[in-house]
Structures are given as C-alpha cells and as structure tokens.
Amino acid sequence: MLKVAPNFKLLQSKWYGKIAKKGFKDIEGPSGMLNEYSGSHYHEEFSQQVGSKTPNSSKVVKELQAEYYRLATAFLNTKRFKKIEPLLQKMVWRLHVNGASTREIGTKLGVSTMSVQRRIDKTKVVFLKWIDER
C-alpha cells in the first residue's frame, strides 16, 4: 500500500472542494476507479452535433458505430499507409476496424497497448482528413 503524508488527505479534500465549486467533474470516483467504463457519452455528444432527435438512443449509437466502421474499412481498403512501419500500421488498423480491442491487437502483434493506441490515433487523424475530402 502506498504511504501518504499525514496532511495529504486534508490538502486533497481542500483542493477537490475548490475545483468542484468551479464545475470540475472528476472521471474517477472516491475509490480511484473510473465512473464510466465506456465512451457512450462521446456518441451522445456526436449525435447531438449531427442533429439527432434521440441522442441517448442505443439505436443511434449503433448506427454511428456502424457508419464509423464502414468508413474505416473503406479507408483501409483504399488508402496507402506511408509511415515508417506501414505494414504494422495497416495491420493495427485492420484489427481495429474488425472490432479488436487495443489489448487484443497488442497481444496479437507483440506490441504494447499504448503503441497500438498511438497508431490508431495517428491513423484516425489521416482517416478524418480522408473523410472530409470525400
């Protein structure tokens, strides 16, 4: 167990109170665990941005996910990967668009999940530009 200075909890409580007054909403609960375990709130925000009348509808979320994966697959099949390791980048993206988690991708390809996430994030930037050009 991690040892903390005796006044740490008091100081932490003081600062948590200050930021809460300013509207800060922590993603972690008192135990240090995440309050939400999925990115569904991002889908809801996106639904609202595109004018959905039912942003909380699981149907809308599923439709958005299906459209994302449809476009991501089209990108995979039409775009050339020109980075330093194009084969690895393309393999990561292929597994991603087929629904594999970052952990599954990392295990399968022998790289860290952080490396997988960075590659997905970098590819998403190019992917979003590709969508805008269409």
Image: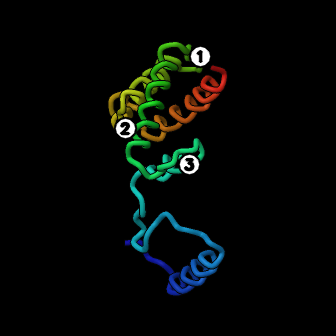
Check disc 3 and report the residue beneath it: 48
Check disc 2 and report the residue beneath it: 101
Foreground: disc 3 or disc 2: 3
In the rendered structure, find residue 116 and report the number of the disc placed on it: none
Density class for disc 2 (Cα within 10 Å; few <14, some 14-19, many ≥20) is some
Task: Give the residue type that dot 3 points to.
Answer: Gln
Task: Give the residue type that dot 2 points to.
Answer: Ser
Which residue does the image show at 36% across and 32% down from the upper left? 99
Is 49 drawn above or below residue 26 in the view shown? above
Q: Where is residue 116 in the image (x, y as percent from the top left)?
A: 46, 34
Cα distance, mark 3 to mark 1? 35 Å
Q: Position of residue 53 (x, y in %)?
A: 51, 48
Which residue does the image show at 33% across and 35% down from the upper left? 104
Residue nearest the viewer, comparing 85 with 55: 55
Q: Position of residue 91 (x, y in %)?
A: 43, 22
Check disc 1 and report the residue beneath it: 82
Is 101 drawn above or below residue 132 in the view shown? below
Which residue does the image show at 54% across and 82% down from the upper left? 13
